[in-house]
Image (spheres, grey):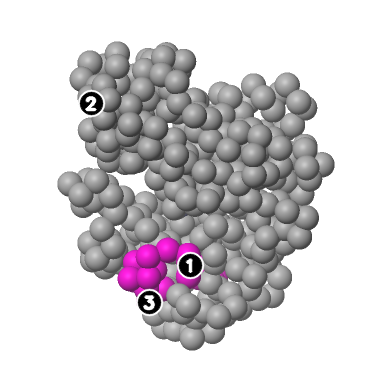
Amino acid sequence: MNVLGIESSCDETAAAVVREDGVVLSDVVASQFEVHTPYGGVVPELASRAHLSNVVPVIEQAVRVLPRGFADVDAIAVTNGPGLVGALLVGLSAAKAIAWSRNLPIVGVNHLVGHLLAVYLRRSAETPAVELAMPYVALLASGGHTALYRVDGPSDIAQLGETRDDAAGEAFDKVAKLIGLGYPGGPIVDKLAALGDPKAIKLPLPMRNKHGLEFSFSGLKTAVAQHVHKHGVPTSEREQADLCASFQRAVVRSLVDKSLAACAREGVPRLVLGGGVAANRGLRTLAAERCAAVGVQLFVPPIASCTDNAAMIAYAGAQRLIRGERDTLDLSVFSRSPPMTSSLSRSQSA
Ligand code: KG4
Ligand code: ZN
């Protein structure tokens, strides 16, 4: 089964064709990076307009890999939340038009479920299947979300804890803006942090030993703002690097501490990292060290599977289709009960 996935929840217009076994046949992402950079963050109206321009070419490019084009697409999977409403509507409208005109089954996919199952994507037919048994604990850390989940099955997912305020990626972006580093800040901070001393500046370690599996990053961001207020915006690369390294260390320690606490609490020795922040080298390194020390198996998907993409949406949709689930063309962003949203419930044991 070839599933065409379409994703437009934030600032990437993406389309991909994925087989139900996770093999990615095509994966096209049109980034709106240049559109939003002058504003230092995503501007929803501009995002919708850019999706409108990009959605058709991106889908056409994704389908081109199939010998008979659209005739080889068996089903459509589309992100129908959460995300920017105007942005989601563009992908949803395109998906419905294709499903209607070609009489194909369509399923809506929760964007977060896409991230949580992305670990099973196989970037080529030669890539062996990922040997990851369920249940597993997943840390999803992106620009819009930071939360821990227990995944018992593609439709059996419980949230264990989430951030009380900023998402981790949002904190990276805001700190980068404070220091005048540009947007999106995560990759720039990551690069500079590698050159700095993580102990140079004393910053609070968010929610250390407190509040179970919840995160908080706004206090840390304020501490960076106060440092900048007191000492001025760092001008030399040395000062920038030290501040980035100190900030990144605090975020990454919090993410890893809570992830391992979740594994211990759930009695699950398997941890998956996902979302754009999973690209962070500091996070990858510390997670690998700490997991090895306590006997937790760590799964970190390739970066293309961590950041927003449509392959993860196609794969998560395929799992719904395999279970015989279908949506109708009434599918909407505000869909009252998308089958996977209800399963993203809070764990009763939290
Ligand atoms: O998952 P994603 O592509 O989109 C959302 O769903 O938000 O994540 C984007 C976020 C941005 O905040 C970006 O700054 C952050 O992920 N990010 C990083 C790195 N690469 C991307 N944060 C820290 N280190 C990185 N290397
Ligand atoms: Zn995302």
Residue 17: percent from the left, percent from the top? 49, 58
Mark 2 or mark 1, which has the lower sequence index?
A: 1
Q: CA distance from mark 2 to mark 1?
A: 38 Å
Q: Which residue is mark 2?
A: 233
Residue 128: percent from the left, percent from the top? 66, 40
Residue 236: percent from the left, percent from the top? 22, 16
For badge 3, the amino acid type reads Ser
Farthest residue in the left direction?
38
Q: Which residue is mark 1?
A: 81
Q: Is residue 13 left or right of residue 233?
A: right
The boundaries of the magenta stretch are: 73-93
Task: Tell me the tag on residue 327.
Answer: none
Q: Dividing the picture into quarters, in which one does residue 20 lie? A: bottom right
Q: CA distance from mark 3 to mark 1?
A: 13 Å
Q: Which residue is mark 3?
A: 93
Residues at badges 2 and 3 in contact (C-beta under 8 Å)? Answer: no
Mark 2 or mark 3, which has the lower sequence index?
A: 3
Q: CA distance from mark 2 to mark 3?
A: 45 Å
